[in-house]
Amino acid sequence: MNYKELVEQIRKKGSFLCIGLDSDMKKIPAHLLGCDDPQFEFNKAIVDSTHHLAIAYKPNLAFYEAEGSKGWASFEKTVKYIKTTYPEIFVIADAKRGDILNTSSLYARAFFETLPCNAMTVAPYMGEDSVSPFLEYPGKWVVLLDLTSNKGSFDFQHMVNAETGKELYQEVLIHSQKWANKENMMYVVGATQATKLAEIRQIVPDHFLLVPGVGAQGGSLAEVAEYGMNNDCGLIVNSSREIIFASKGEDFAEAAANVAGEKYQQPMKELLTQKGLA
Amino acid sequence: MNYKELVEQIRKKGSFLCIGLDSDMKKIPAHLLGCDDPQFEFNKAIVDSTHHLAIAYKPNLAFYEAEGSKGWASFEKTVKYIKTTYPEIFVIADAKRGDILNTSSLYARAFFETLPCNAMTVAPYMGEDSVSPFLEYPGKWVVLLDLTSNKGSFDFQHMVNAETGKELYQEVLIHSQKWANKENMMYVVGATQATKLAEIRQIVPDHFLLVPGVGAQGGSLAEVAEYGMNNDCGLIVNSSREIIFASKGEDFAEAAANVAGEKYQQPMKELLTQKGLA
């Protein structure tokens, strides 16, 4: 899916919501645990009930790998189900991979050839050749970790470069623009540091930003839009636990749709309307 | 496996070799491709023929994920086979994971509970709370990326901190020592930057270093030992392609053992003997 198609989806649905499929087996509703593939059945129900409210889904691999190869099969089945049933949906493998060139090529094969993901999250620590193999697939995207939503983001990401006066997360933005462009790269910027979005927009005015940390982690949607939105929206805001675990009962899918609609898609539609984008 | 047991293994075998099981389906010998599980059969044969020469194996997840959930099953089977058949062997999942606390806990569950890995590689970009969940398992190890062997390591890892004058890879060593100790943390330092090992030893004199990049990537074993070895050896040197793909014929396992012995274990034994460690 290319940049233009993504912007069109956002306008059409009046939404820039990504739902994180962090489908921890220890948290999914008890009545599903008897199924052959509880993680997939859970995801399928969530996707079927929310696909009109979201433009993207982001399964995080940790929650599948915790179940071993069976979990990987649930992840695969989920990605294939979404891309077959709702091909307009943008699927982000939240994998945070990154390795030497030879090895990153294999990760790219895993998520972009073996599986039909549209994008995957990649860690920047190992530099250009750890990222470039993912950029060789037309229409596929790297979502590069930049300024994350967790406490540990203060350990290294704000370190100031003695030569340039820029912080590490700013250097990541500056360097990576030499490798990629707004058609194949986005950045992860945590909503918990929303005021930083204005600064980030000065460095990357046109790139999409994937913003986790709204909801359970405490970030505010209005602030994210105020500081981060550009003329094509330029934002994909992710919420995981708050939506998918809204209810632990048999109504979990309906409850997820209610939260996705009321707390995310409806306010998003208003924010987009104010910008003339919906 | 704890620090003392690891040092004992090194002394006993006269080796500090780790063999990287980068078992790319596109490179394993043709005669295995008819098996039910070619990646596992390949790994099993390599391990059976080299276990007396190596103290550790390091399957890199990329090569298994490229085959989807089937590949994950081969990875699982490999880890379980090694830990059942050769329990003294140290198994490192080369996964380069790292995420927010809640999510890193699930990766820890994946590799340390669902699977019996002894250690896993973790990326430092997201800071302490992305690493700490892996440190909660007694006897398990984090192998933190520090100074990697690839070209891209020059993009960010050498950035100088304006406040301290230290480079990012040095900051990673300094900070992470507050989270962990030599009993549960090692560092990845590429052999292609062997002269940096002397500097690194000033910051972490006692920690084990996992050193990739000898062999196919061009690093030298003698230099690594000269600059990196400490009184308990303190080194695990990894070689992957040069050993496992020494032959593409039916003699691949024997050929792997020959390279592992002649190019690695024998020179390692000499280096250990010179230090009074074998």
Image (spheres, coloured by chain):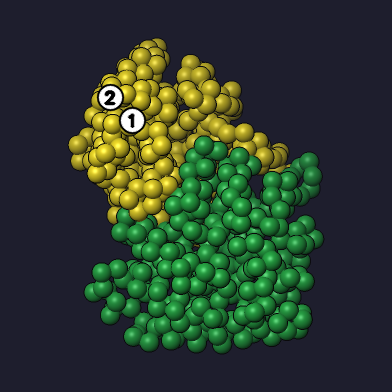
Chain colours: A green, B yellow
Residues at circles 2 and 1 in contact by the CB criterion of under 8 Å: yes
Residue in the image at 38% along x and 45% along y: B64
Give coordinates of residue A113: x percent, y percent. Answer: 48, 51
Per the image, the residue denoted by label 1 is B29
Residue in the image at 30% along x and 59% along y: A70
Residue in the image at 64% along x and 62% along y: A2
What chain does mark 1 sit on?
A: B
Q: How far apart are marks 2 and 1 (CA)?
A: 7 Å
Q: Residues within 10 Å of mark 2 (few under 14, many from 20)?
A: few
Per the image, the residue denoted by label 2 is B250
Give coordinates of residue A39: x percent, y percent. Answer: 35, 69
Label 2 is placed on what type of residue? Glu
Q: How crowded is mark 1: few (under 14 residues within 10 Å), some or many (20 or more)?
A: some
Quadrant in the picture for the N terminus of chain A: bottom right
- Toward the viewer: A128 or B11? A128
Dot 2: what SS? loop
Give coordinates of residue A129: x percent, y percent. Answer: 61, 40
Specify the quadrant of the image occupied by residue A56.
bottom right
B205 sits left or right of B253 in the view: right
